[in-house]
Image (cartoon, rainbow, N blue to C red):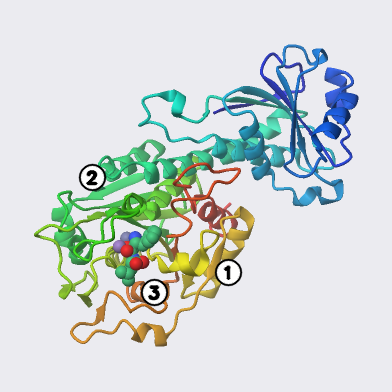
């Protein structure tokens, strides 16, 4: 989708989009440009029962006074007293949905709004997110939804201010859409080595990317991660992305992602129904790549590490067996009792590696880790587990700001006991009860004293419900959340 900002002026083609409050009053700049539209809007509103409620829309054929415009699209802003609470990003999604596949001029005259540039830039972000489609494997483009060919021109009083506010967000939309692409790609295309290549493309933005192959992983001792991949014909990889935008010697902040490119369950194989969804079991890693893209695009003044464990969980003759005991990178041993609880094995090694190698100020990991988090929270909230209240509170706040909401779940020694093993230091599942919590307890055994938070995104990271800003199976969940976290607390100015 192409987005531009221009001064108020005539419409050359496509649709004209305007905003009205619940009083249905057409704003003055619109009237000055296009003559009296008030009667038309009131009559059409009455016949369509359009009340100017937030995100409500009204579409009518354009009257002659608008010139060559095809349609007039009116979008509701609700009561003026409530304007400060307006969700502009969502509204941008609504408007992009209304004009999908066409071009439109959006007269962004927003009565009662203090910072028009910020509101317009948020709408542009929402529009970019809404316009995303994944249709590269559809050979008949008619089957595809109307897509991002739409061209939006926001007509505003101060285009320069909008351009500046938008520039701060354009890389963010690209980062989210990059994460979506990765989650949506099929598993025959996006296997670990290919995923690593996609991460390597971040070098174009100045990110240092190091890809560790199987030999190197073996040399390092990432035996748990390798054990997960040993039943697959595809080799495992770990990609480390580094953005050095902060001061020299300043401890980096670190983001770690589960990148299981396909999770069949391994020998503890999953049922056939819905198994195709397990191509999305790399959503955590996708979010980390999308986040690094967003942060590098705006040249964030912070040192940031992104580390992703890439592997495929398959059942062949070389696959790991329930009962196997693995000596993990940390030196701790794991009795592997269920090969479908593979994500924690991958993350344990990567978390330990990041902690030891980079001595980070904090680590946040993202993983489609447990079906149990879907049982607990559904698809509205990600599960948040943390050993540090400040980090947890900051994530909760970023969730409220961005709408990518997280809900804190407990950790504790009673849960930790549930993964003790008869034969090794721990086993990789803790039974039916509290499945998301025992998984998090497992991870906690690999983070030492480093402030750490774990986001279980099995519910939010894939198979997403449609919203005004997302029509994609893979929503790119968490890129905006973590970008906000960094923005709010970890950028030196
Ligand atoms: N990748 C799955 C979790 C998952 C489930 C993600 C549904 C997205 C949607 C994970 O590797 C897994 O299989 N977890 C098991 C753990 C169990 C064996 C302890 C689960 O949740 O059933
Ligand atoms: Mn699994
Ligand atoms: Zn998995």
Q: Are marks 2 and 3 in contact (CB under 8 Å)?
A: no
> In the rendering, at what x and y percent does residue 470 appear?
54, 43
**In the displayed structure, does residue 306 sit left or right of residue 268?**
right
Mark 2 vs mark 3: give the one in front.
3
Q: CA distance from mark 2 to mark 3?
A: 31 Å
Q: CA distance from mark 1 to mark 3?
A: 23 Å
Q: Which quadrant of the view contains residue 55?
A: top right
Determine which of the numbered discs, if any, sits on residue 193 in the image. 2
**Front-lying residue, 342 or 245:** 342
Ligand 1 is in which quadrant of the figure?
Answer: bottom left
| Residue 165 visible to the viewer | no
Work out which quarter of the rendered image holds the N terminus and state it: top right
Mark 2 vs mark 1: give the one in front.
2
Work out whether mark 2 precedes mark 1 in sequence or the reverse, and give the earlier one. 2
Circle 1 sits on which residue? 393
**In the displayed structure, does residue 41 sit left or right of residue 283?**
right
For numbered disc 3, what is the local secondary structure?
helix
**Front-lying residue, 278 or 410:** 278
Determine which of the numbered discs, if any, sits on residue 435 in the image. 3
For numbered disc 2, what is the local secondary structure?
helix
Q: CA distance from mark 2 to mark 1?
A: 36 Å
Determine which of the numbered discs, if any, sits on residue 207 in the image. none
**The residue carrying mark 1 has its beta carbon less than 8 Å from ligand 1:** no
For numbered disc 1, what is the local secondary structure?
helix
Mark 1 vs mark 3: give the one in front.
3
**Front-lying residue, 363 or 147:** 147
**The residue carrying mark 3 has its beta carbon less than 8 Å from ligand 1:** yes
Q: Which quadrant of the view contains residue 381?
A: bottom right
Work out whether mark 2 precedes mark 3 in sequence or the reverse, and give the earlier one. 2
Instruction: Please tell me whether residue 347 is drawn above or below residue 476 in the rendered image.
Output: below
> In the rendering, at what x and y percent does residue 478 appear?
49, 54
**Label 1 Cα crowd, 10 Å radius (few <14 / some 14-19 / many 20+):** few
């Amino acid at each position: 989708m192409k987005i531009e900002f221009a001064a108020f002026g005539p419409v050359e083609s496509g649709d004209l989009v305007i905003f009205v409050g619940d009083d249905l009053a057409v704003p003055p700049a619109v009237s000055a440009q296009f003559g009296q539209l008030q009667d038309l809007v009131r009559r059409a509103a009455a016949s369509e029962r359009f009340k100017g409620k937030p995100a409500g829309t009204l579409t009518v054929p354009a009257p002659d006074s608008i010139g060559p415009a095809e349609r007039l699209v009116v979008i509701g802003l609700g009561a003026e007293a409530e304007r400060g609470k307006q969700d502009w990003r969502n509204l941008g999604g609504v408007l992009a949905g209304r004009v999908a596949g066409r071009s439109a001029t959006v007269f962004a005259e927003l009565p009662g709004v203090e910072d028009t540039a910020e509101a317009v830039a948020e709408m542009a972000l929402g529009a970019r997110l809404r316009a995303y489609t994944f249709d590269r494997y559809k050979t008949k483009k008619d089957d595809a939804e109307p897509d991002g060919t739409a061209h939006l021109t926001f007509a505003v009083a101060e285009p320069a201010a909008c351009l500046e506010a938008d520039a701060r967000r354009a890389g963010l939309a690209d980062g989210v859409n990059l994460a979506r692409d990765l989650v949506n790609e099929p598993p025959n295309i996006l296997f670990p080595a290919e995923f690593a290549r996609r991460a390597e493309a971040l070098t174009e933005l100045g990110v240092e990317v190091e890809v560790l192959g199987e030999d190197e992983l073996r040399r390092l001792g990432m035996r748990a991660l390798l054990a997960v991949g040993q039943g697959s014909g595809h080799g495992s990889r770990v990609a480390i992305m580094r953005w050095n935008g902060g001061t020299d010697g300043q401890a980096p902040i670190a983001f770690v992602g589960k990148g299981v490119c396909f999770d069949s369950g391994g020998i503890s194989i999953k049922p056939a129904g819905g198994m195709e969804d397990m191509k999305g079991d790399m959503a955590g890693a996708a979010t980390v790549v999308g986040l690094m893209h967003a942060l590098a695009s705006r040249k964030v003044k912070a040192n940031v590490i992104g580390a992703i464990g890439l592997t495929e969980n398959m059942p062949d003759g070389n696959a790991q067996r329930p009962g196997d005991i693995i000596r993990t990178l940390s030196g701790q041993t794991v009795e592997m009792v269920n090969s479908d609880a593979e994500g924690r094995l991958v993350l344990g090694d990567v978390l330990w590696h990041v902690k030891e190698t980079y001595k980070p100020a904090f680590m946040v990991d993202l993983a489609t880790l447990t079906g149990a988090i879907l049982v607990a929270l559904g698809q509205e909230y990600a599960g948040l587990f943390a050993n540090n209240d400040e980090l947890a509170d900051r994530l909760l706040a970023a969730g409220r700001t961005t709408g990518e909401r997280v809900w804190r779940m407990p950790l504790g020694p009673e849960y930790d006991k549930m993964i003790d093993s008869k034969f090794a230091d721990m086993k990789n599942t803790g039974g039916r009860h509290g499945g998301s919590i025992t998984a998090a307890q497992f991870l906690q055994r690999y983070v030492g004293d480093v402030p750490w938070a774990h986001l279980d995104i099995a519910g939010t990271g894939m198979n997403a419900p449609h919203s005004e800003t997302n029509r994609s199976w893979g929503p790119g969940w968490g890129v905006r959340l973590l970008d906000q976290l960094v923005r709010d607390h970890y950028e030196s100015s």
